[in-house]
Amino acid sequence: MAVDVLLGLQWGDEGKGKIVDYLAGKYDVVARFQGGPNAGHTLEFDGIKHVLHQIPSGIFHPHIVNIIGNGVVLDPVIFQEEAQKMMKFDIDVTKNLYISKKTQIIVPTHRLLDKASEQAKGNDKIGSTLKGIGPTYQDKIGRSGLRVGDIIADNFEERYEALKQKHLGQLAFYGFEEDFSEMEKAFFASVEFLKKFKLVDSEVLINKYIAEGKSILAEGAQGSLLDIDYGTYPFVTSSNTTVAGACTGLGVAPKNIGRVIGIVKAYCTRVGSGPFPTELFDEDGETLGKVGNEFGATTGRKRRCGWIDLPALKYVIALNGVTELHMMKADVLNGFETIKACTAYKLKDGSVTEDMPYELQDVTDAVYEDIKGWNKDLSDVKDFDAFPAEVKDYVAYLEEKLAVPVKVISIGPDRTETIMR
Ligand code: GDP
Ligand code: IMO
Ligand code: MG
């Protein structure tokens, strides 16, 4: 069977975790293919809220195999904390979680390098989550990284030491010093913990599952506008968050990709630095943040809020070949008489475009269309027909502008607050 890919289409935090958990029951396998502990995916059911950073969001369904793919960068310390939390909920993660031996490992000095690099950038800082993501991907591409499969090698400590020495040289360049002896102790303890897990050649396993007709959902982290190639560079993350990342990050051939599910907020948020043409600095922005509880699931930082950005969405829908959209957090717009959608950008040189410019920083103004809001509570809605006409109109408007069907409308954080069409 084909591998379905679920991706965030904005700057992350669209609600991917909620939908993976919602859809997971229909799949045999859920796999993460890129990113690492910079991600924070929130799931809510039975009155409990869970935040997952590295463990795939299918973990609460005992029949599902969860895979951390080779494209991921894994912090064993954060992994241990997460896995132990799961164990408290009686989930035997050592049984239904597999980790690729080719997954790159985040070591303590990667985290220090992230900090040092951000400090050196000053006002131009990326606004990284400081989890060591950039430095770990740099070592992967620079061919000096450590992989999960290496932890059982006799010379693992030696190889770790060599990488650490290289990092100490880089930290000296930045003039950065910090005692990390405690971090190092925790790191080695967590490496021992990691040995309890099924460390596998996940690309082989996944292709075996495909051949057996098993259904697989690939769970993206971050969002397409944070993609290393197509995002708002340099204010991006260090991996391919777009659909091709699922191919390289899991070993899935393009011909085996099926549905491409684009997760999109009914408005837009961003955390960290970088351009955001529809960002609001007024009361409406405050309302979106307050009603949407827009605080980062990983760092707790306040998320910047604004209206939906159609030119940016059109751009990433094409890049990803999105086959369906899931519109999240419709309920956050409940109190608005008018909703705005950005349909074009005005650029520095005075021109107006519906295309993504080379530098999104060059956008001076967003051009908006007004849409009538529903201005009603949606909590009693149980099926699509029961939505107020204005919600249906907004959905139809997005479908017309983006030329992709909207299959799911989410009206609250809980698993049950999901309306499938
Ligand atoms: P992810 O990184 O894409 O998985 O998203 P996050 O978990 O970082 O952020 C999404 C936030 O919105 C979480 O707090 C979710 O519980 C919450 N959420 C998801 N869907 C909805 C929704 O339809 N309405 C509301 N109000 N909150 C939602
Ligand atoms: P999920 O999977 C939102 C942002 C950071 C920063 C930039 C680079 O929960 O949607 P990094 O730590 O990767 O070096 O940070 O990317 N960022 C995210 N923003 N959601 C995420 O993940 C993010 N992961 C990274 O805020 O601007
Ligand atoms: Mg998140």
Image: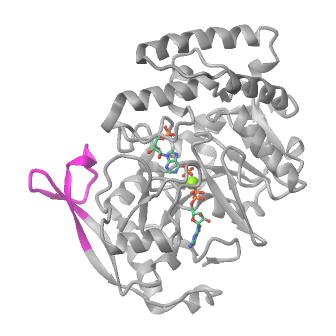
Q: Is residue 400 above or below residue 180?
A: below
Is 339 magenta? The answer is no
To which quarter of the image does residue 23 belong?
Answer: bottom right
Instruction: Locate residue 180 relative to residue 289 in the image: left or right.
Output: right
Point 51% across, 19% down: residue: 177
> Where does the image place residue 204, in percent across and percent down from the top left?
76, 32
> Where does the image place residue 255, in percent across and percent down from the top left?
60, 44
Examine the rendering and report whether any part of residue 94 can be seen. yes
Give the magenta range. 344-368
Instruction: Locate residue 28 relative to residue 16 in the image: left or right.
Output: right
Q: Is residue 415 above or below residue 121?
A: below
Point 78% across, 38% down: residue: 80
Q: Nearer the viewer, residue 81 or 407?
A: 81
Examine the rendering and report whether any part of residue 212 can be seen. no
Rendered-image quadrant of the C terminus: bottom right
Instruction: Locate residue 70 relative to residue 214 in the image: left or right.
Output: left
Q: Is residue 344 above or below residue 185?
A: below
Q: Quadrant of ligand 1?
A: bottom right
Q: Nearer the viewer, residue 90 or 174?
A: 174
> Where does the image place residue 341, in percent across and percent down from the top left?
32, 72
Point 52% across, 41% down: residue: 129
Q: Is residue 100 above or below residue 390?
A: above
To which quarter of the image does residue 127 belong?
Answer: top left
Q: Nearer the viewer, residue 224 or 277?
A: 277
Is 362 magenta? The answer is yes
To which quarter of the image does residue 82 belong?
Answer: top right
> Where does the image place residue 36, in percent across and percent down from the top left?
61, 39
